Image (tube, grey):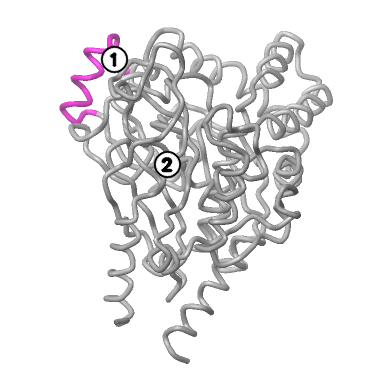
Amino acid sequence: MDIKQEIEKANEEAARRMTIGEPVLVDIAPASEVIPGMEDRMITHAGPPIRWQDMCGAMQGALIGQVLYEGWARTPDEARVMLERGAIRLEPNHHHQAVGPMAGTISPSAPVWVVENKAFGPLTGISDNRAFCRQVEGNQQFGDYSEQALQGLRLWRDLWAPTLRKALRHIGGLNLKPIITQALQMGDELHNRHSASSSLFANAMAVAMVEADIPKAEMLPTLKYVTNHNLIFLGLAMACAKAIADPAMGIEYSTVVTAMCRNGTEFGIRVSGLGEEWFTAPAPVVDGLYLPGYSAADAGLDMGDSAITETVGWGAFTIGGAPGILSLVGGTPEEALAYSREMKKITVAAHPTYRMPALGFAGVPIGIDVRKVMQTGIAPIIDTAIAHREPGHPIIGAGLVRAPLECFKKALIAFGRKYNVG
């Protein structure tokens, strides 16, 4: 078998593993209980590895907020000093089977979504089939460390997450694949538009809370929270995508991308046949729309682990079927359809279950191939939110961005070296 045949066979296997994923929500638990390698005085963050001094303002602000939330410091200045002198260990979410939106910061007491990919397990030889994501409970992940932002973290920890956990345990877990399938039919793209998926999830958990006979004092505020949170499914979708993508890692000869993420300074990708190595380039500028009072002059660079959704064919890859998102990120329905068609040119398969009605019920394009990216010059498109360039601010806008081609070029060169390909 020649090298081209080896690559095609490997990519078929990577796509197969991604398309058979069966994500199930199995728990909502403090990070210290479930995330591998999570330690006291440790915070994980979005994107590839980065030092505190090289972080953007929004990520530094989010870390300050997490330190205050944990009670390790009393003031932002104290928190900053601790972070500057290395008293808090900082590591990427992806190094711990986790993901997080925007700054993506996760600390030990923060409850996280626990999603298990039931298609894989010890009997398949792929045992790392769980993924974790923090909840989107406010603006803290944008770098806001105000009292209001921290209160959102506390309410999630002390009230909302424990109540949902009781309900989830009562029903024995929640299959998320039907929700994802239906939400795509209802106009979600599962990155920044979660109106349908959040509603479907809230419906399921409302019934579960009633069946679990949860006390009214806990159930009512939690019901109000989940039924009025249009982005509650974002963290779930990200954990699903991570659990779906991870089994495709480590396939010899595969050129399929298994992760895309950014930390506000660098954009990084991983490739199946190259294992856990990161290939990075400077984080790009987002072309977006801004909330009143903000402009491009205020914006930081692209940030977050949420591009894991595009990695498995959601987000901007299926934006042609989600025109409602355009009022947030900009563009026209015609452009959105063109983006989804364009992404088919750089992927290896179409998903047999996750489909786009607006494109004749075609399956979402899945399995980004670094070879096709470099051959066509088409970079993956991502829809995303925009954080401020300085710490201490909430969300300031949203838009569209292209992954840097330099990441794919570096990966392809490394692939050539490893597999002796000219």
Query: Viewed as shown, does residue 315 lie left or right of 59?
Result: right
User: Horizontal placement of 338 versus 81: left or right?
Assistant: right
Q: Residues within 10 Å of mark 2 (few under 14, many from 20)?
A: many
Query: Label 1 is placed on what type of residue?
Result: Ala
From the top left corner, tell me how far across and down residue 330 is, in percent: 52, 32
Question: Which residue is found at the position 73% from the left and 12% from the top?
Answer: 220
Distance from disc 2 to disc 1, alpha carbons, whole Å, reads 36 Å
Residue 401: image tag: 2
Magenta range is 72-87
Q: Quadrant of residue 219?
A: top right
Give the residue displayed 29% in from the left and 9% down from the top: 74
Question: Residue 104 versus residue 314: which sits nearer the camera?
Answer: 314
**Viewport quadrant of the C terminus:** bottom left
Query: Is residue 173 visible to us here?
Result: no
Q: Earlier in the sequence, mark 2 or mark 1?
A: 1
Measured as percent of width and height from the top left, residue 57 is found at: 27, 25
Instruction: Judge by depth and name the residue closer to the eye, 333 or 83.
Output: 333
Label 1 Cα crowd, 10 Å radius (few <14 / some 14-19 / many 20+):
some
Q: Is residue 316 magenta?
A: no
Please name the residue that numbered disc 1 is placed on. 73
The amino acid type, in three-letter code, at marker 2 is Val
| Relative depth, front residue between 135 and 228 | 228
